[in-house]
Amino acid sequence: MINRSQVRYAGFWRRLLAFTIDSLLYSFLITPVLIASYGRDYFYWSASHSAFYHVYGVGDVLLTKLLPVVLILLFWARLGATPGKLLLDIRIVDARSLKPIGFKKALIRLLGYAVSFITVYIGFLWIAWDRRKQGLHDKIAETVVIRNPEYYENKTLPELMSQFK
């Protein structure tokens, strides 16, 4: 259990770095699949793509739109963190109880991401100035992101992965 007086909130730059790590990791994993499925032209923007978000097919939608959202939701609900957050010893917890958030709060937080995007990313920039380092999505879901190296340091990878069962 976390003592409220010892809580250290994860700031904007640490959270941005975690997001960057997650994005790069997913890109490294998914790029070969996209190239195998659609060829190298998949990554070249073309004037022939009339829509801002051109869709190549069902696989494109599943791999680049749906799968990342599902993975983020699962990581948040089961571990309270994505791989990038795990690497940086931060995790998402309930703002009141400081306990893991579970699936419902993870889903609300994910929907809050959409609100943070719609506000021209101000919902994310809010993290830099907020007292508890909460973005708009955190406020909507009543979550906070805390620095907590002790939570993961004594757990092995199989122990962490067993939470997905």
Image (tube, rainbow, N blue to C red):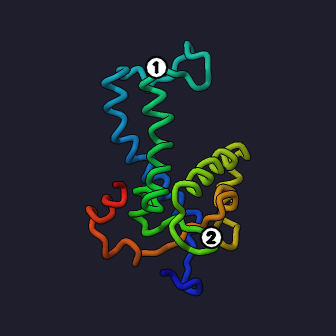
Closer-to-camera residue (69/88): 69
Picture disc at residue 57: 1
Q: Mark 1: which amino acid?
A: Gly
- In the rendered image, residue 65, in percent from the top left (x then y), is placed at 50, 34
Say which residue appears at 69% left-offset and 54% top-offset: 123
Q: Quadrant of residue 153?
A: bottom left
- In the rendered image, residue 33, in percent from the top left (x then y), is placed at 33, 30
38 horizontally vs 111: left or right = left
Q: Quadrant of residue 47?
A: top right
User: Element under label 1?
Assistant: loop
Callout 2–callout 1 Cβ contact below 8 Å: no
Closer-to-camera residue (133/44): 133
Say which residue appears at 35% left-offset and 41% top-offset: 28
- In the rendered image, residue 109, in percent from the top left (x then y), is placed at 61, 54
Picture disc at residue 95: 2
In the rendered image, the vertical position of residue 149 relative to residue 124, given as above or below? below
In the rendered image, the vertical position of residue 25 relative to residue 105, given as above or below? above
* Visible residue check, residue 96: yes
- Furthest-top residue in this view: 48
Callout 2 crowding tier (Cα within 10 Å): few <14, some 14–19, many ≥20: some
Q: Earlier in the sequence, mark 2 or mark 1?
A: 1
Total numbered labels: 2
